[in-house]
């Protein structure tokens, strides 16, 4: 296809897409008004089940099946990355990844913030039903916190802190826990992902029924998933071709 | 509040442009990380702290780090 023709195809595509987008935006409710039909349904449903954080309630109680889908997507993506980034036959691990010592201030930053970040991550996971946060956010923060050790120049210590077989199992266990909670819902009420535990008192740590359990499962799965993902990328950086390799 | 949202939106726009026009992919990873932070501020101002938290971890740290590691791998091959 010639360059001019490609530009024409692009132009037509952009024009059509742009027109549809503008039309869609014009038909949307105005920004910042008090007309929120979804909120009017979601907030009372969340309060009725004792979740102070409506987002968590929507994610794990009202629309649990959507979140199960998201979990599965993450799980599948991590597996795909692990499969694609596996070491090739002619590659081997470098003995010493060429450690460069970072600035003292950077190392200090990593050492001080790692435990703080890990605690914040755990806090976000367990308080998901009460305050903003939850399994996904907390899990990502946990994975990020662990990698602050890499920022501090301690790649080897970080490797020791995340034994890969354990992390891989915990990722699968977190995702499986989500599905198991869903089937427990079928067993008790006949509905998949139904909230089967007592709702507790609004705003307390133990409230919102199964929502905290979902948060812990998702937190485990997301934290481990992100760690596996990054571990595969790190592994690639430290791989070198074997001496005498063809390609 | 509207003023703050307008400022944040403008910053996100500027950040997006900066990411697109960063020529060196390694620098692009850094501008992408800053863009992630700007998005976090925007989500926070739009009263979506849950999304802001996700964006902070994914947009500011995970994705730029993956980009950085990929670039390091590619450079190592040359």
Image (cartoon, helix red, strand yellow):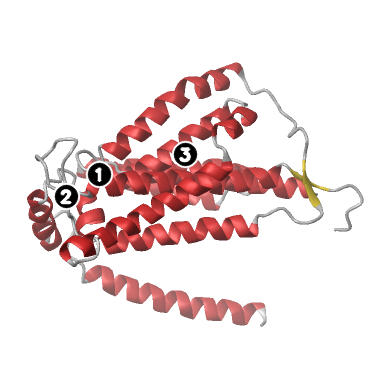
Residue A11 x %, y %:
50, 77
SS at badge 2: loop
The quadrant of the image that shows the N terminus of chain A is bottom right
Tell me: A154 left or right of A241: left
Residue A93: x and y in percent read 76, 42
Where, quadrant-wise, is the C terminus of chain A in this rendering?
bottom right
Between label 2 and label 1, give the one nearer the viewer.
2
**Crowd band around label 2 with a 10 angstrom C-alpha radius: few (<14), some (14–19), many (20+):** some
Q: Taking A167 as reference, is A156 above or below it? A: above
In the rendered image, residue B55, in percent from the top left (x then y), is placed at 39, 46
At label 1, counting other C-alpha atoms closer than 10 Å, the crowd grade (few under 14, some 14-19, many 20 or more) is many
**Labels 2 & 1 near each other (Cβ < 8 A):** no
Please give left or right for residue A150 compared with residue A235 in the image: left
Residue behind mark 2: A197
Q: Is residue A156 shown to the viewer in this render?
A: yes
Foreground pick, B32 / A93: A93
The residue carrying mark 1 is: A212
The structure residue drawn at horizontal position 15% and vertical position 42%, both measured from the top left corner, is: A207
Give the labeled residue for mark 3.
A143
């Amino acid at each position: 296809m010639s360059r001019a023709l490609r530009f024409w195809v692009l132009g037509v595509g952009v024009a059509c897409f742009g027109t549809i987008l503008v039309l869609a935006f014009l038909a949307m409710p105005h920004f910042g008004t008090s007309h929120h039909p979804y909120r009017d349904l979601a907030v009372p449903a969340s309060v009725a089940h004792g979740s102070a954080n409506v987002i968590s309630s929507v994610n794990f109680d009202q629309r649990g099946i959507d979140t199960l889908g998201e979990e599965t997507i993450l799980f599948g993506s991590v597996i795909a990355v692990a499969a694609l980034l596996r070491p090739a036959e002619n590659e081997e691990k470098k003995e010493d990844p060429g450690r460069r010592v970072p600035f003292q201030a950077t190392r200090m930053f990593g050492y001080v913030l790692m435990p703080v970040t890990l605690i914040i991550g755990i806090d976000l996971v367990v308080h998901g039903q009460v305050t903003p946060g939850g399994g996904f956010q907390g899990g990502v923060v946990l994975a990020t916190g662990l990698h602050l050790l890499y920022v501090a120049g301690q790649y080897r210590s970080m490797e020791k802190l995340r034994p890969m077989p354990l992390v891989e199992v915990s990722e699968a266990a977190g995702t499986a826990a989500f599905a198991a909670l869903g089937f427990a819902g079928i067993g008790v009420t006949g509905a998949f992902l139904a909230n089967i535990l007592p709702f507790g008192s609004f705003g307390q740590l133990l409230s919102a029924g199964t929502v905290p359990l979902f948060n812990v499962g998702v937190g485990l799965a997301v934290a481990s998933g992100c760690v596996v993902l990054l571990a595969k990328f790190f592994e690639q950086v430290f791989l070198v071709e074997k001496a005498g390799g063809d390609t | 509040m509207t003023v703050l949202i307008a400022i944040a939106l403008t910053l996100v726009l500027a950040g997006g442009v900066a990411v697109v026009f960063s020529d060196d992919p390694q620098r692009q990873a850094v501008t992408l990380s800053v863009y992630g932070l700007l998005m976090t501020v925007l989500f926070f101002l739009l009263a979506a702290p849950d999304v802001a938290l996700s964006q902070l971890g994914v947009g500011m740290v995970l994705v730029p780090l993956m980009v950085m590691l990929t670039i390091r791998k590619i450079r190592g091959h040359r």
